[in-house]
Amino acid sequence: MFRIKLKAGALQFTLFISIVIALLLIAFILLVQTHKRFTIQTDFIKESINNSNKGITYALSNTIKLNDTTTVNLKDEDYKSLKVYRDFWGVFEKITSTSKIKTNTYKKVALLGASQPSLNRTALHLQDNNRPLVVVGNTKIEGLSYLPKTGVKSGSISGQSYYGTQLIYGSTRETLNFPQLNKELLLSIKTINTLISKTPQNLYINLEVGQQYTNSFLEPVQVVFNPSTIRLNNTSISGHIIIKSKTKIIVDNTSHLKDVILIAPKIEIKQNVKGNFQAIATEEISVQKNCVLNYPSALVVLKKENIKNSATNNKNIIPLKVNTNSTVKGAVIYFDLEQKNNYNIQLSIADDTTVYGEIYCNDNLELDGSVYGTVYTNNFTTKKAGSIYQNHIYNGQIIVDSLNSNYIGLAFKNSKKGILQWLY
């Protein structure tokens, strides 16, 4: 019998090879398990994103209680959930959709408004006050128009007659019910101070010149507050932030505002300001020359009951005025809770000024500029050559088809909702 003697080094080498093979097998098993877990996690993330989209879609077609969370039935495993929260950000609905699968959570936030009808869009909706609409000069109204029973006619002001070939470039219907703003919208604006008062002190911002402030809409709202005048200059502010003064806010053209809300009795927007934001006042908003307020901006004067202020007592002060050569893309709203018969102008759009979107005025509107979209108003008023002309439009234009058909704007009762803006 032959015996083979192996050296100790060979045994060590064999053992080393065995350990390497074992380690490679363990590494392969770990790699497979890691890849499998990564795939599952990726699928969960993808599903969470899809479910959050489903939450926004659900909000578009279902009634959700204001300032409340609704659980959407996914008809799926118990470890998956979808919750939708509805509130307002200024004049637009805000929907927060939160999807959760085990430890994976994904949120999406969107602003909602009313989408445009595909055909026969409304250019003008004029309240019936037993007076006809009178068009003068280079006035042009193009699109479906709801008019008083007395209809529309041409007129003249200071020797200027009507130069159009048609009184209305589009079909007309008789005004029956004047559109009313969403009650929840009005309630949200009136109670926004409650939201501010509930904000913890650590979420208040002390503004400093030259600084930049940003807050995600996925985070709680932050507040800038001062009982005296706030002057926004050489400052950048964007996101989920409310800026409130008990007296006045002045916006300089060195400021950069994006998606924020301004709240004060009086708001003054200086010349050459550019940005997109919502300004909400109880007394007066003045937009000076050469301003560009990008979509989705909103200018809102919401008069309080029994309010006594200089804008009310001084007939020369127009509560909401957009001056020459300015552009507003979004909504311009004047709403008086105690509407009275008067001859004063409450909302004025100056010549060479353009509004892309909607004007809503439940009192007197002076339209010297252009509206590419829709006008809802109780009455037109024109002051020329020292005289006041009721229900006259002088050189104003309302052309609805010049507004992009994908525009999403103010929501009225029973209007079809659409996504106005994805928030960040």
Image (spheres, rainbow, N blue to C red):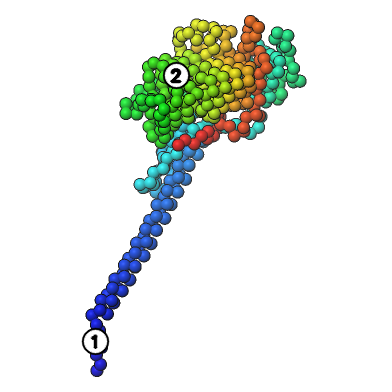
Residue at which label 1 appears: 5
Which quadrant of the figure has residue 220?
A: top left
Residue at 31%, 74% in the rendered image: 17
Which quadrant of the figure has residue 229?
A: top left
Q: Which amino acid does label 2 sit on?
A: Ile
Which quadrant of the figure has residue 147?
A: top right
- Nearest to the observer: residue 374 or residue 218: 218
Residue at 37%, 58% in the rendered image: 34
Q: What residue type is labelled 1?
A: Lys
Residue at 68%, 13% in the rendered image: 134
Q: Badges 1 and 2: C-beta atoms under 8 Å apart?
A: no
Query: x, y percentage for residue 411?
Result: 53, 27
Q: How much space separates mark 1 and mark 2, taking CA atoms?
A: 97 Å
Q: How many other residues sit within 10 Å of disc 2, few (<14), some (14-19) or many (≥20)?
A: many
Could you say whether the residue bearing mark 1 is in a helix, strand or loop? loop
Query: x, y percentage for residue 391?
Result: 64, 12
